[in-house]
Image (spheres, grey):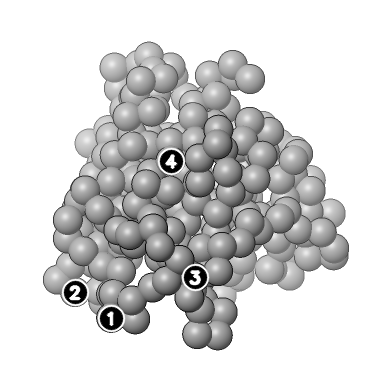
């Protein structure tokens, strides 16, 4: 079966308030250190209505997909992978790209299937793609790697879900990596975290219930390519495509509002 669950914002020693949202601190950094960092201004400036690209959206695991049916049961043989760009992560990325471009934030969308035909080294391939764009378009400030989660509880799948404007909408979660001083080297992790906090705060302010807490942990995810590089999980494999697309649109609307300072 599928369990529909709206994840609340976190509380307790592992969680740092972030406006209406929160950050889960899975690092050895103190809560006071994280709280101080997220108070800093955005580490970059977006130029609205610029002819030059400001944002790049790509997908390391582009073939990740969602259910195409809405009944609250899942098919154990469903692989939740497809090369069909109208059903996989590219569909969500395209919806986000349209919202940003319509808002005057010039955005590029790369639809390379970095995890096909081989899942191995997909992050290495997406890093090459990101660096190629950044070299060609030095105006790009933000690199968003858009994924979906896969959540299970026992033999059930979990569907992270909220309701916005009367419509079922997938919940989203930003992941901001942290430098562990060892094998994972993210010297600018504080800048990425600051960006994550600002976006999280804006999403929850405008669309309460849209987000799960930001995850700050020892993850790499190519977040060394730019001080505006983040990974965002849009729903999970038990959400429908429509729920995920709606979530991507709301996340992008909040990002546009953050960049133009309209709200």
- Is the C-beta separation of discs 1 and 4 under 8 Å? no
Q: Earlier in the sequence, mark 2 or mark 4?
A: 2
Q: Is residue 209 left or right of residue 244?
A: right
The local secondary structure at tag 2 comes to: loop
Residue 112 image position (x, y, % from top left)? 19, 53
Which numbered marker is on residue 246?
A: 4
Residue 254 image position (x, y, % from top left)? 54, 31
Which numbered marker is on residue 118?
A: 2
Q: Earlier in the sequence, mark 3 or mark 2?
A: 3
Q: Residue at x 39, y 28 (%)?
A: 100
Classify mark 2: residues with Cα within 10 Å, few (<14), some (14-19) or many (20+). Answer: few
Which numbered marker is on residue 119?
A: none
> Which corner quadrant holds the C terminus?
top right
Alpha carbon of mark 2 to alpha carbon of mark 4: how far?
29 Å
Pick out the residue farthest to the front. 71
Depth check: give the residue in front, 119 or 89. 89
Q: Which quarter of the picture shows residue 121? A: bottom left
- Of the two numbered discs 3 and 2 in the rendering, the one whose residue sits closer to the viewer: 3
Q: Earlier in the sequence, mark 3 or mark 4?
A: 3
Q: Residue at x 34, y 52 (%)?
A: 241
Residue 87 image position (x, y, % from top left)? 25, 53
Question: Circle 1 sits on which residue?
Answer: 77
Question: Circle 3 sits on which residue?
Answer: 2
Alpha carbon of mark 3 to alpha carbon of mark 2: how far?
29 Å
Q: Earlier in the sequence, mark 3 or mark 1?
A: 3
- Of the two numbered discs 2 and 1 in the rendering, the one whose residue sits closer to the viewer: 1
Q: Residue at x 84, y 54 (%)?
A: 32
């Amino acid at each position: 079966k599928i369990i529909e669950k709206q994840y609340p914002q976190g509380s307790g020693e592992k969680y740092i308030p972030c406006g209406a949202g929160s950050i889960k601190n899975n690092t050895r950094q103190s809560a006071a250190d994280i709280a101080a960092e997220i108070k800093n201004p955005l580490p970059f400036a977006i130029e609205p209505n610029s002819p030059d690209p400001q944002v790049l959206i790509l997908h390391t695991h582009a073939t990740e997909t969602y259910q195409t049916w809405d009944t609250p049961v899942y098919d154990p043989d469903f692989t939740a992978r497809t090369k069909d760009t109208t059903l996989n992560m590219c569909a969500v990325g395209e919806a986000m790209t349209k919202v940003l471009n319509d808002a005057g934030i010039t955005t590029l969308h790369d639809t390379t299937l970095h995890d096909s035909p081989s899942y191995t080294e997909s992050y290495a391939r997406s890093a090459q793609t990101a660096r190629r764009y950044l070299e060609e378009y030095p105006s790009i400030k933000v690199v968003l790697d858009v994924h979906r989660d896969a959540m299970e509880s026992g033999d059930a799948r979990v569907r992270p879900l909220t309701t916005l404007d009367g419509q079922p909408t997938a919940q989203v979660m930003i992941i901001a990596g942290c430098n562990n001083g060892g094998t994972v080297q993210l010297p600018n992790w504080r800048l990425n975290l600051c960006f994550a906090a600002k976006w999280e705060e804006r999403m929850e302010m405008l669309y309460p219930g849209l987000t799960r807490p930001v995850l700050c942990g020892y993850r790499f995810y190519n977040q060394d390519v730019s001080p505006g590089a983040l990974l965002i999980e849009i729903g999970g494999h038990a959400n429908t495509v429509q729920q995920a697309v709606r979530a991507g649109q709301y996340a992008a609307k909040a990002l546009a509002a953050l960049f133009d300072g309209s709200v």
